Amino acid sequence: MMVGCELLGTDNTLVFKTDRDEYNPGQIVVVEVGNRLASPVGLNLCFTYLSLERQTDDGWEPTSAYGGERPNTVCTAIQLAVRPGNSSTGTFHLPDNQGNGTYRITTRFEINNESVWANTNSFDIR
């Protein structure tokens, strides 16, 4: 199952969006998770669960910016629960050398004991 930004603004959805539509390399991105579902949503915004994807002519492709271990960074791997009607935010730092283009963030959520992959709205890095 996949949910994404095309579902934003409707009832009975999972909201997963960034705070802006454009960033510079090295800036902080704030990601909001809003739960408009009837059941809690489990998530972990640790870097090992995030994928920064770049739009290409062939579709969306993962970059090497996130996933795996990062030096001098601790990943707690704590599963958070966002209750129905609530929201939560997380932040992460875009790499200083991230190239220009259109991107989105993809991560995994747990809804009713099922893994659900979701992506944010697209945003530009200039």
Image (cartoon, rainbow, N blue to C red):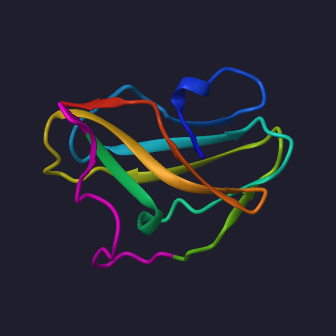
Closest to the observer, 61 or 123: 61
Residue 89 position in % (x across, y down): 59, 47
Closest to the observer, 19 or 3: 3
Left or right: residue 61 versus residue 78 is left
Q: Residue at x 79, y 57 (%)?
A: 112
- Res. 56 image quadrant: top left
* Quarter containing the C terminus: top left
Q: Does the magenta-highlighted stretch encompass residue 71?
A: yes
Left or right: residue 56 versus residue 116 is left
- Res. 71 image quadrant: bottom left
Q: Does the magenta-highlighted stretch encompass residue 34?
A: no
Left or right: residue 14 versus residue 117 is right
- Res. 2 image quadrant: top right
* SS assignment for the magenta stretch, majority: loop
Residue 39 position in % (x across, y down): 84, 48
Residue 77 position in % (x across, y down): 56, 75
Q: Residue furthest top?
A: 9
Above or below for 75 versus 114? below
Left or right: residue 36 versus residue 28 is right
Q: Residue at x 54, y 77 (%)?
A: 76
Q: Residue furthest right?
A: 38
Above or below for 58 versus 9? below
Closest to the observer, 121 or 76: 121
Q: Residue at x 44, y 78 (%)?
A: 74
How many marks overall? 0
The residues colored magenta run 55-75
